[in-house]
């Protein structure tokens, strides 16, 4: 099942994430507490480089969503896991989560979407405004360059 990823900046320090496939969708708020856009870009790089397992953490307040991808036989098997509190900060068990979306798709489909998300932010927000909104985190320009093979 194709995975659709939407990531839009909102107010200072917040973004909106929507993950969907042909049958289900899941939306989450994303806080500045974690550098999720950089992790999302790294996930795409990991897939591009053939890494067998990778993930991105999207922190909310409270809770967090982990997008976990495992490569098997040229298929990117994905699972979106919701945690009631911050498992990445050891405030919740890493084994206690709810799977809110799962499926499999072509790795390139995910890489292309993430690259498009990054390009959209550069084109419509810019690096300076991004830094204003995400105070703690710079736009992942080097990651984008790597995805574009610059």
Image: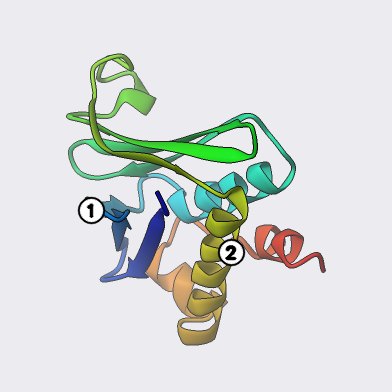
In the shown orientation, is residue 27 left or right of residue 34?
Answer: left
Dot 1: element:
strand
Q: Is residue 55 above or below residue 41?
A: above
Q: Nearer the viewer, residue 73 or 89?
A: 73
**Residue 66 x, y percent position in the rendering:** 37, 36
> Is any part of residue 139 visible from this angle?
no
> Is any part of residue 3 visible from this angle?
yes
**CB contact under 8 Å: marks 2 and 1:** no
Q: Nearer the viewer, residue 10 or 115?
A: 115
Q: Residue at x 23, y 52 (%)?
A: 23
**Residue 109 x, y percent position in the rendering:** 55, 58
Q: Using a 10 Å C-alpha cutoff, classify the residue at mark 2 as few (fewer than 14 neighbours), some (14 to 19) or many (20 or more).
A: few
Mark 2 — residue? Answer: 112
Mark linked to residue 25 = 1
Q: Is residue 118 above or below residue 136?
A: below
Q: Is residue 136 above or below residue 84?
A: below
In which quadrant of the rendered image does the C terminus lie? Answer: bottom right
Q: Residue at x 26, y 71 (%)?
A: 11
Q: Residue at x 49, y 75 (%)?
A: 121
**Residue 144 x, y percent position in the rendering:** 66, 64
What whole-number distance in Å separates the C-alpha atoms at marks 2 and 1?
19 Å
In the shown orientation, is residue 3 left or right of residue 39?
Answer: left
Mark linked to residue 44 = none
- Mark before the other along the chain sequence, 2 or 1: 1
Q: Using a 10 Å C-alpha cutoff, classify the residue at mark 1 as few (fewer than 14 neighbours), some (14 to 19) or many (20 or more).
A: some
Q: Nearer the viewer, residue 74 or 87?
A: 74
Q: Nearer the viewer, residue 143 or 139?
A: 143
In the shown orientation, is residue 8 left or right of residue 150?
Answer: left
**Residue 68 x, y percent position in the rendering:** 45, 34
Dot 2: element:
helix
């Amino acid at each position: 099942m194709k995975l659709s990823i939407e990531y839009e900046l909102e107010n200072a320090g917040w973004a909106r994430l929507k993950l969907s496939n042909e049958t289900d969708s899941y939306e989450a708020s994303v806080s500045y507490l974690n550098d999720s856009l950089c992790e999302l870009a790294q996930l795409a790089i990991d897939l591009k480089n053939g890494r067998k397992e990778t993930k991105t953490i999207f922190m909310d307040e409270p809770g967090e969503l982990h997008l976990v991808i495992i490569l098997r036989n040229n298929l990117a098997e994905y699972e979106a896991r919701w945690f009631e509190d911050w498992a990445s900060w050891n405030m919740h068990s890493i084994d206690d989560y709810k799977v809110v979306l799962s499926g499999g798709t072509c790795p390139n489909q995910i890489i292309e979407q993430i690259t498009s998300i990054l390009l959209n932010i550069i084109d419509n927000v810019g690096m300076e405004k991004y830094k204003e909104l995400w105070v703690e985190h710079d736009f992942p320009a080097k990651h984008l360059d790597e995805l574009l093979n610059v």
